[in-house]
Amino acid sequence: MDRERLIRYLSLLVIGVAAVLPFVLEANLYLLNVLILMLIFIIFSSSWNLLAYSGQGSLGHAAFFGIGGYASTLIAVQSGLSPYVTIFLGGAIAAGIGVLIGLTCVRLKEWFLAMVTFGFAIIVQAITVSFLASLTGGWDGIASPRLVSSQVPGYILIEYYSILAITAGVILLIYLIFKSKIGMAFLAIRENEIEARVSGVDPVRYKLLAFAISAGLAGVAGALEIHYFGYITPEIYGIDISFWPIIYTILGGLGTIAGPVVGTVVLTILWDGLKVFGLTYERYIIIGAILILSVIFLPKGLVSLPDKIAGWWKRRQKKSPDAGT
Amino acid sequence: MGELEIFLQILFWGLYAGCIYILLATGLNLIFGVMKIVNFAHGEFLMVGAYVTATVFALTGLNPYVIILFSMVVLVAIGAAVERFCFRPILGTGKLNEIFLSLGLIYLFQNLAALIWTDKWQSIQSPYASISIPIGPLNVPLDYIIIIVVTAIILAGLHLFLKRSRTGRAMRATSQNRKGAMLVGIDVERMDVFSFSIGCALAAAAGTLWVVSGQVFNPYMGSIPAVKAFAIIILGGLGSIPGAIIGGLIYGVAENGAAFLLGGMWKDAVSFIILIVVLVVRPTGLFGESGE
């Protein structure tokens, strides 16, 4: 209980820090850009984490990220609706396609599921540049309306706060899902599908639900990125885009709310921090080494670090002869 | 060119492309069989093998088909180190950790290679590049024929090793039942190192065959072939080596056919369409054991 309260205050503190950060940075454009992308990837990683929570590890989450981006852009361009509306429509379309993809995946496990989701990202990309080329502009991509028109003074700040609000909303939503019966059902399926069925949880329904929510949130993240950049190309379906949420989430701590957030923040700081030293390939080498070391020595992610340090501290105190005095 | 020639041409290219997939997929399958892990960074071993061969070739001018042996030995050493220091500590901690570790290895290897050899596209010229042999209506480059023969020799050697040698039999025992193998006194951790190293050596062979065929290469070349090799072993059934061979051939032919009929962007997509269709019908793959 005590711990729960601590976490609640901590998350409020984090949001507070995020809210005042632009003023501390004096609206430095480069850093604001880094922060905005960080927030978008927090949503994206959290959506991946939700699917993994139900026992389904996707290797092709870029498919939903990209579908959300394309759908939102096309709707905004064709109908003239504000991107503030279309990002959620894009998310809804990504969720719908997520259910369709989920239908082929519900019977599959582990590697099989990973490969099929990976394949879908590649297939969606091929469809985007061939059959839908007249709509999507093929490999060249198309322009996308900005979230806030660049004529509005301080538009980047408005965008930053909008995205911050959406991020906080998404994390709250995931928190509520994890706490609810749905979250319990996801856990039950992940741990043992047959036992879940015995206790009255229909695995297929819940797996599809997880796919829908996860794909929808990934679609919102993709739409946000696209409207922030102002253009979209099929590179949004790239393999690396599918890999980032996995890296962020597992580094932070798989299956926890804070994991994707911590992982994204830490890696983003590291990533842009190393850039200052003018490193290029070395940056990737350092990050690669960190990933390898972290999974060996900290398999539960960075969020388990405080417990680990506390445990180590306790053991040390017990061992030292003057303990207990 | 008539339609028959085009068809034969596609078939032959597919056979040649299939060789590289088969070597990668067989290696992955061997590792999966023994250790029950999948290394997504397997393509990086193909890449390192390609660069080792190209570098030795540039330095010494030896016949690249001889350098293949050197390249395989180098990769045996690298493979043993990666198995010992990266995969062994996380063995049995979950599939997602293996993917995560592989991603770390991918970044590490790709960028180390880019530091050493730059990330520009390179190519080397095989000594037989100008020779081609007429087979029926086709003019087949000699290199392609050698590549197919070399692949067949390597696979036959692997088959003999697994069936006849004591170590090979111990490896198969480990892959059938790890605990049982331990009980009869097999050092299963040693088998892990062996299978991982042999898998890496096969990837080095694939990388070498890639460069001698005159194809361009760069540090990022390995990712997509590795993922496809992985799709192949899932298509063929995890742990089944005949499945890997047939799957590799299917992919090689299907990809080249799709690139010709539908355009280059479908080359990668078609392999996954096949995979998804097969898995929807048969969730354990073509040759996988039915039921879980």
Image (cartoon, helix red, strand yellow):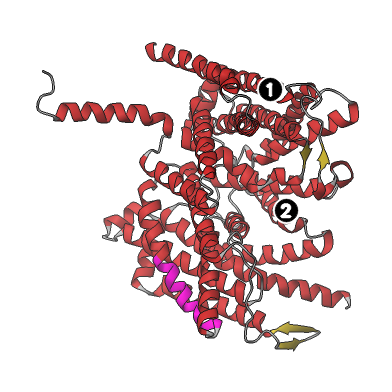
- Relative to B81, say whether A96 is above or below: above
Q: What residue is at 56 percent from the left and 16 percent from the top?
A: A176
Q: Residue B292 in the image: x percent, y percent?
A: 51, 45
Q: Which residue is mark 1?
A: A157
Amino acid on which disc 2 is placed = Ala
| SS state under label 1 | helix
Q: Residue B226: name its quadrant.
A: bottom right
The subunit letter for the residue under badge 2 reads B
Residue A206: image location, x then y, percent: 61, 26
Q: Residue at x 52, y 55 (%)?
A: B41
Image quadrant in which you'd find residue A29: top right
Q: What range is drawn magenta here? A: B64-77
Label 1 Cα crowd, 10 Å radius (few <14 / some 14-19 / many 20+): some
Q: Chain of mark 1?
A: A
Q: Nearer the viewer, residue B148 or B89?
A: B89
Per the image, the residue denoted by label 2 is: B269
Residue B152 to residue A266: above or below: below
How many numbered discs? 2
Q: Position of residue B118 (x, y in %)?
A: 57, 63
Q: Main secondary structure of the magenta part?
A: helix
